[in-house]
Amino acid sequence: MRASRGVPSARFVTALALVWGRAWGGSVSFDDEFGLFVCAGLRGGFARGGTTVGGVFLTRKPPARPLLRHEAVHADQWARYGIGFAARYLWEELRNPGSRNRFEIEAGLAEGGYRVDRGITRRDEP
């Protein structure tokens, strides 16, 4: 599992996200290709079209493969930074919203459903 290979707090956050997803009515599956839990069918409890917390993608409807690839990169980011990723992401989103957010750029804008302009689609370094 992607988030479990990182810092210990990422495993804790993943467990909390699974509980959160079930509490909002989601059903949990595991995607072997991307090493990510998918909690689909939620009534709410997530941002935009879905949110990755730890190693769990929380969403209303089953995601397309490109979106899952994008969310798997966010799980890698959680594994890298642990619980501190939430603050890092929020700070970046406040300074550089949407398609200018470096974490979204790293994950791949087109796969995440962002409008791609300025020729930026993915950045290898965080």
Image (cartoon, helix red, strand yellow):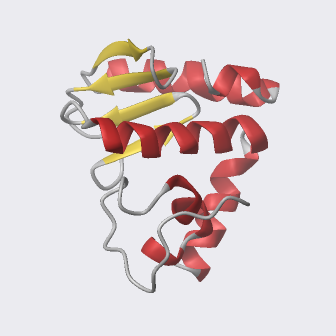
Indicate the quadrant where residue 122 lies: bottom right
Q: Position of residue 121 (x, y in %)?
A: 47, 67
Q: Residue at x 50, y 75 (%)?
A: 120
**On the rendered image, what quadrant is the C terminus found in?**
bottom right
Q: Residue furthest right?
A: 7
Quick check: can you spot residue 12? no
The number of callouts visible is 0
Residue 116 locus on image (x, y percent): 36, 75
Is residue 70 among the parts visible in the rendering?
yes
Q: Is residue 13 above or below residue 86?
A: above
Q: Is residue 90 above or below residue 24?
A: below
Would residue 116 appear left or right of 11 to someone viewing this image? left
Foreground residue among 27 and 103? 103
What residue is drawn where x is 70% and y is 60%? 88
Query: Is 53 on the left or on the right of 113, as rendered?
Result: right
Query: Where is residue 18 shown, x and y percent of the image?
Result: 46, 20
Q: Residue at x 48, y 28 (%)?
A: 56
* Residue furthest to the front: 119
Give x and y (percent) for residue 72.
Answer: 51, 36
Q: Looking at the figure, which quarter contains the N terminus? A: top right
* Depth order, front residue of 100/120: 120
Q: Is residue 74 above or below residue 99?
A: above
Examine the rendered structure and indicate whether residue 15 appears above or below residue 45: above
Q: Nearer the viewer, residue 125 or 86?
A: 125
